[in-house]
Image: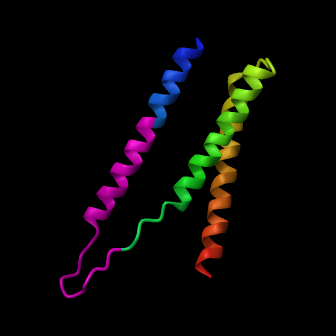
Amino acid sequence: MEKQTMGAIVALGLFTCITLCVYFIMRYRSKAIHIPGEERRRQPADWQKPGILVLGIGIGLLIVGILQNYLRAGLPDSLVVAILIISAGLSMILANRLDKKHDI
């Protein structure tokens, strides 16, 4: 695939993922069970975990971009996906550990 086509597909996929994540979060919050006798306090939105996850994916994309463009390494597609999955997994582990430390 050409670079412009691949960039457009990645950008469209990222936009779709973010849009669906926001949609399902808002849908879950609107459908949450409300007990009539209980006053419901609005809790602040916690964007720490999604932010760290997006940062990890961005770092993975940066690493892949540097390897492919500047070092002229002909990476197979499976290695590119593996680098992105590993960076996303590490960022999820980091976000979980930071969240546990925050609760204590």
Q: Main secondary structure of the magenta part?
A: helix
Quadrant containing the C terminus is bottom right
Span shown in magenta: 15-42
| Residue 16: in magenta span | yes
Q: Quadrant of residue 67?
A: top right
Q: In percent of the image, x 67 and y 41: which residue is there?
A: 59
Q: In percent of the image, x 24 and y 86: which residue is there?
A: 38
**Looking at the picture, how far across and down is residue 69, in whole percent?**
73, 20
Q: Quadrant of residue 7?
A: top right
Q: Is residue 52 left or right of residue 8?
A: right
- Return the residue found at the far left: 36
Q: Nearer the viewer, residue 87 or 7?
A: 7
**Looking at the picture, how far across and down is residue 87, in whole percent?**
69, 45
Q: Is residue 75 visible?
A: no
Q: Is residue 93 left or right of residue 7?
A: right
Classify 57 as above or below 76. below
Classify 81 as above or below 36. above
Quadrant containing the N terminus is top right
Classify 85 as above or below 94. above
Q: In percent of the image, x 60 and y 69: which residue is there?
A: 99
- Return the residue found at the far bottom: 37
- Tell me, what colour scheme is on the image? rainbow
**Looking at the picture, how far across and down is residue 76, in whole percent?**
73, 21
| Residue 40: in magenta span | yes
Q: In percent of the image, x 81 and y 21: which residue is there?
A: 71
Q: Is residue 31 left or right of residue 77?
A: left
